[in-house]
Amino acid sequence: MATSYGTYYFDGINFSQATSIYTDAALTTLAANGWYSQNGIVRQQLNGVLLNAQPCNDCAVPCGSGISANFSGTGHFNADVDLANSNGATIIYAWMGSSIPDGIITNYNSINYNRLTCKNNHNGVVITEQDGTVVDYSGFNNQGTNLPTYVGSNSYSPVGSTTGVTNYNYVNPTGYQTLGTTRTISAVNTQVGTTSSTSPVFTMVVPKTVTSVTNCNVQIFAPITGTLFRWQIACPTALPSFQGSALSAATTCLANTATYYFVQNAIGTSPPFTVDSNTTPEVGNFVFLDVNGSTYINDSSTIKYIIIDLTFALGIRNGVVVSIQSCTPVP
């Protein structure tokens, strides 16, 4: 069945709870009988009344997919993803082109995620906000804002306000399609977490912990003309684990006493990206207390250490490995 797109208006706080759908902002002209969908929800309008909301899995991108986009203008790019019924860590890898940064934010179960790292973060790659402030990960000072984090190269600045940005929605499997509407995109220094080199592949973890909630929303904000971005989203899975000591303020060699988890970074310029195969964390990896990636280890600005196999001390700060060194033998 062919899909058509248009601008419609509804009389509720969201599409799921609306009573009717209209063709005008004044809500005076009812839309025709038929099926309408938004953000993974589909509803039938019959005789001017919207019937029960239903999930529309066919409308969404299936997890395990890779998405590519290249547009000459600016844009806001919306995509709904079907994560299916399994739980675990949903890993997103994103490459934002060679020079123009783009913003990214993911919503799952009404929680927004905008924290990212990359390969060699703290090991030659430096992540900075737009004013030059060095941060442990992209989005460090953007947590709790529900705003996108801009990642990629720092060759251009997304800071400021851009009007007339075209809205797009992803139609599976066709690609991003214009909605015929525009918006204003604004960004500030603390939303930026870019690198001085060509964009690496950035890594985001979204914990999926509710079996019945299968929809995930990924938005890309591109206020600079000539955007190019590519991203892929894995189906939820258990994060790889490693054994280590209890968290410590010192690098003293300690025995393994606990199980922890981490996410591997990736390289490449298009999906499928090449995911690292390391079996223990490397510098630049996010590390977690749980298999789903819900709780970061030592999510504080004071460095602490986990000793692995009485050999190596992982320096962890703000949930990311910032150093690896030999542990200090007990006298």
Image (spheres, rainbow, N blue to C red):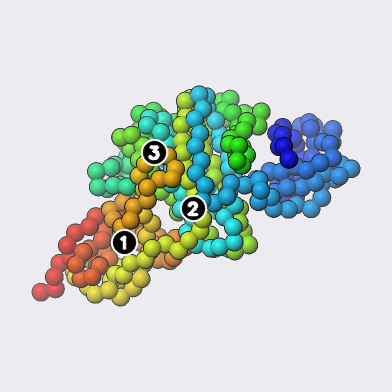
Res. 303 in view: no
Please state the horizontal and vertical placement of residue 36, each as a whole percent of the image: 75, 42
- Quarter of the picture containing the C terminus is bottom left
Q: Secondary structure at mark 3?
A: loop
Write down the residue under mark 1.
279
The label on residue 269 is 3
Please state the horizontal and vertical placement of residue 314, each as a whole percent of the image: 26, 61
188 or 35, nearer to the observer: 35
Please state the horizontal and vertical placement of residue 259, each as a whole percent of the image: 35, 71
Write down the residue under mark 2.
234
Placement of 176 over or under 141, stated as above or below? above
The answer to which of marks 3 and 2 sits earlier in the sequence is 2
Amino acid on which disc 1 is placed: Thr
Residue at left offset 48%, top offset 25%: 225
The residues bearing labels 1 and 2 have C-alpha atoms spaced at a distance of 19 Å
Q: Secondary structure at mark 1?
A: loop
The answer to which of marks 1 and 2 sits earlier in the sequence is 2
Q: Secondary structure at mark 2?
A: loop
Residue at left offset 71%, top offset 46%: 14
